[in-house]
Image (spheres, rainbow, N blue to C red):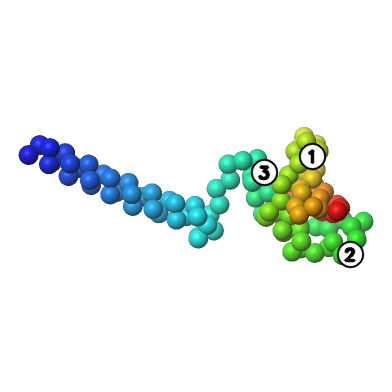
């Protein structure tokens, strides 16, 4: 009888844990827009996506496309070796995506796109 009681409590705890896990993994899958960033590349890109986007005056007109820049900020890979992550007040990042490289300054309240090269 004691075994059945322990088994019952075990199954109650297991079912509560499974329900909690299902809700947590459902949020993590992106259905509700929650994003969990653990790696530096993901954290920096997520931070940059949340700021106002400004184009430099020297940037050619063909590259002043917010969809192109948002693709860099969504799917790009930051080259931390070339980037200047210690400068103040704005850090400079080189973001690679589909053979192109975007150079952007990450300031406290805005992103300044300086250049896009092939």
Q: Secondary structure at mark 3?
A: helix
Q: Which mark is residue 61?
A: 2
First in residue order: circle 3 vs circle 2: 3
User: What whole-number distance in Å separates the C-alpha atoms at marks 3 and 1?
Assistant: 12 Å
Label 1: how many Cα within 10 Å (few below 14, some 14–19, many 20+): some
The residue under the point 22% across, 41% down is: 10
Query: Would residue 23 appear left or right of 6 to someone viewing this image?
Result: right
Label 2: how many Cα within 10 Å (few below 14, some 14–19, many 20+): few
Closest to the observer, 64 or 1: 1
- Residue that protrudes farthest toward the left in the picture: 1
Query: Would residue 35 appear left or right of 113 to someone viewing this image?
Result: left
Residue 69 % position (x, y): 76, 58
First in residue order: circle 3 vs circle 1: 3
First in residue order: circle 1 vs circle 2: 2
Residue 48 % position (x, y): 70, 50
Residue 58 % position (x, y): 92, 56
User: What whole-number distance in Å separates the C-alpha atoms at marks 1 and 2?
Assistant: 24 Å
Which residue in the structure is indicated by mark 3? Answer: 41
Q: Secondary structure at mark 1?
A: loop
The residue under the point 81% across, 53% down is: 100
How many marks do you count on the picture?
A: 3
Which residue in the structure is indicated by mark 1? Answer: 83
């Amino acid at each position: 009888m004691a075994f059945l009681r322990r088994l019952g409590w075990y199954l109650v705890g297991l079912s509560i844990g499974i329900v909690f896990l299902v809700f947590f993994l459902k949020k993590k899958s992106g259905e509700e827009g929650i994003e969990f960033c653990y790696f530096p590349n993901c954290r920096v890109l997520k931070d940059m996506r949340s700021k106002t986007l400004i184009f430099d005056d020297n940037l050619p007109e063909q590259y002043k496309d917010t969809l192109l820049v948002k693709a860099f900020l969504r799917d790009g890979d930051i080259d931390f070796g070339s980037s200047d992550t210690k400068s103040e007040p704005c850090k400079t990042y080189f973001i690679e995506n589909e053979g192109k490289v975007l150079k952007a300054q990450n300031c406290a309240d805005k992103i300044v796109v300086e250049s896009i090269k092939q």
